[in-house]
Amino acid sequence: MAHYFTNENNIKSEIRTINYINGDFSLVFNTDNGVFSKNHLDFGSRLLLETIIKNCEPNKKILDVYCGYGFIGISLAKILNYKVTMIDNNKRALHLTQMNIKKNNVDAVIHESSGYDKVTEKYDMIVTNPPIRAGKKIVLEILGKAKEFLNINGELWFVIRKDQGAKSIAEELKKIYNLEIVEKSKGFYIFRAKMC
């Protein structure tokens, strides 16, 4: 089930659409086989997005790490007027994200990148629903390395389910961040991390 974290070129394409409404904003996303949460909006991603919308100011420069088909980054560009860069290492996800940028008429940038390999700038915020099935070591690397790409007073926002190691991952990250749980719902924890 780790295929969405890698490139499986022989998976048959079956593009479908998912709708998302938030207040006056209505967005549409193309999804496909071989990407995370292809049939519906992932609850954790939606909770992360809506927690950011409730708690953060507009007009930030952000990086969406392992963006999938672009749900979080594109929604933040549309709703909070964020200047968004999105990265993923899954070519199909990046193709979908490009389609969804156009479909939702937002100004955003995407790059193929394994982790932060192709990231050269710093951001006010980094957001991610990390690829848990890639393993704890990779998840900790994604979350820990984010600090290198945050501006002063920048924030890392992420979601992890309680039963997928949220508490043990949080304990590791407390060594490098001031970490707080901003929201909890249905076993999902939304974290905000600031540099110590």
Image (cartoon, rainbow, N blue to C red):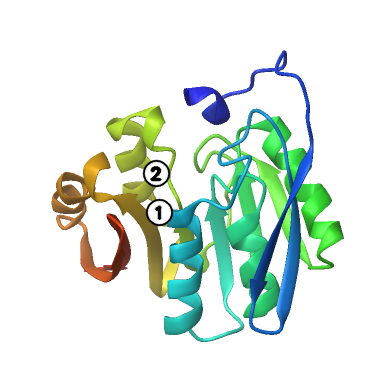
Measured as percent of width and height from the top left, residue 170 is found at 19, 53
Question: What quarter of the picture does the C terminus occupy?
Answer: bottom left
Q: Determine whether, in the image, residue 166 is placed left or right of residue 27.
A: left
Task: Please give the residue where the numbered disc 1 appears in the rendered image.
Answer: 146
Q: Report the Cα–Cα distance between label 2 and label 1.
A: 6 Å
Determine the residue positioned at 58% across, 85% down: 58
Residue in the foreground of this view, choosing between 194 and 78: 78
Height in image: 37 above or below 101?
above
SS assignment at label 1 = helix
How crowded pointer 1 is (Cα within 10 Å; few <14, some 14-19, many 20+) is rated as many
Height in image: 160 above or below 182?
above
One can see residue 80 in this view: yes
Q: Determine whether, in the image, residue 156 is placed left or right of residue 37.
A: left
Residue in the foreground of this view, choosing between 105 and 27: 27
Residue in the foreground of this view, choosing between 56 and 104: 104
Q: Looking at the picture, which amino acid does disc 2 mark? A: Ile
Determine the residue positioned at 64% across, 83% down: 23
Measured as percent of width and height from the top left, residue 124 is found at 49, 72
Q: Are marks 2 and 1 in contact (CB under 8 Å)?
A: yes
Measured as percent of width and height from the top left, residue 191 is found at 31, 64
Determine the residue positioned at 76% across, 60% down: 28
SS assignment at label 2 = helix
Task: Please give the residue where the numbered disc 2 appears in the rendered image.
Answer: 142
